[in-house]
Amino acid sequence: MKIFEHVNTVASRVKPRLLVSMMLLSLTSAAVFNIQLANAAVYKKVDTDGNVSFSDVPDKTAQLITVAPLATVPAMSPELIESTLGNDQNSSSKVRVENYKLTIVSPTPDQAFRRGDDTFSANVQVKPNLTNGDQLVTLVDGKQSSGGATSEMDRGQHQFTARIVNVSGRVLVSKSVSFNVLQSNVKQQAPIGKKH
């Protein structure tokens, strides 16, 4: 009985070592295999129907091609990431992003203005108040505007846009609404020779 116990004890000590050795051997083999694959020749073959195939097996009709190495980028260390993003806890220049709520009160969607008779004006609400140098920019048809005489606008549909932009010009929030400028009514004159 003692002989079997001794064999089991020795076997239990050998198994983990054997297992580790086998794992190291398989990892080394995999690494060598991957290096061989990376350096393996690649052949391009076009058949009579125009189908293109690639292989690592040479063929009389195949053409040897060179494959550019795979571009890799080394990982950044946590320290470099922190310094790049400016996550210093003592920094007073922390970027604070506000979640602004932007509401266009007027013009309302598809509101109509009479050309020459009405004045276009916009009313925009922003909550909370702008901070960090953020600004409200208003545009009519893509051009900066704060309103004005409709006589300078062509009749038809127009687009009013309100945007909040940060100091670097990045748009934080944007809303748009369409409105219309209508031609003014023109009094019709009585035909010549007839009095009305």
Image: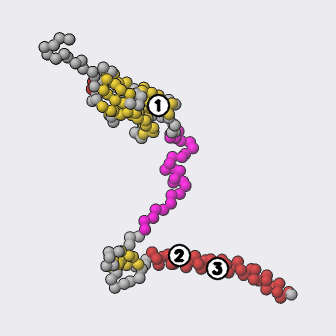
Crowding near the residue tagged with mark 2, few <14, some 14–19, many ≥20 C-alpha atoms within 10 Å: few
Residue picked out by circle 1: 103
The amino acid at mark 2 is: Ala
Front-lying residue, 173 or 77 = 173
Main secondary-structure element of the magenta-colored stretch: loop
Q: Determine the image quadrant of residue 60.
A: bottom left
* C-beta proximity under 8 Å, tags 1 and 3: no
Residue at image position (36%, 84%) is 59
Residue picked out by circle 2: 31
Q: Earlier in the sequence, mark 2 or mark 3?
A: 3
For residue 146, side relative to residue 190 (left or right): right
Q: Disc 1 to disc 2, how far (Cα)?
A: 60 Å
Which of discs 1 and 2 lies nearer the camera? The answer is 1
Crowding near the residue tagged with mark 1, few <14, some 14–19, many ≥20 C-alpha atoms within 10 Å: some
Residue 71, magenta (yes or no): yes
Color encoding of the figure: secondary structure
- Badge 3 marks a residue whose secondary structure is helix
Residue 142, x across and y down, in percent: 33, 36
Q: Quadrant of the N terminus?
A: bottom right
Q: Earlier in the sequence, mark 1 or mark 3?
A: 3
For residue 32, side relative to residue 6 (left or right): left
The amino acid at mark 3 is: Ser
For residue 148, side relative to residue 193 (left or right): right
* C-beta proximity under 8 Å, tags 1 and 2: no
Residue at image position (24%, 18%) is 187
Q: Which residues are magenta?
A: 70-95
Residue 21 has which mark? 3
Q: Disc 1 to disc 3, how far (Cα)?
A: 68 Å
Residue 163, x across and y down, in percent: 42, 35
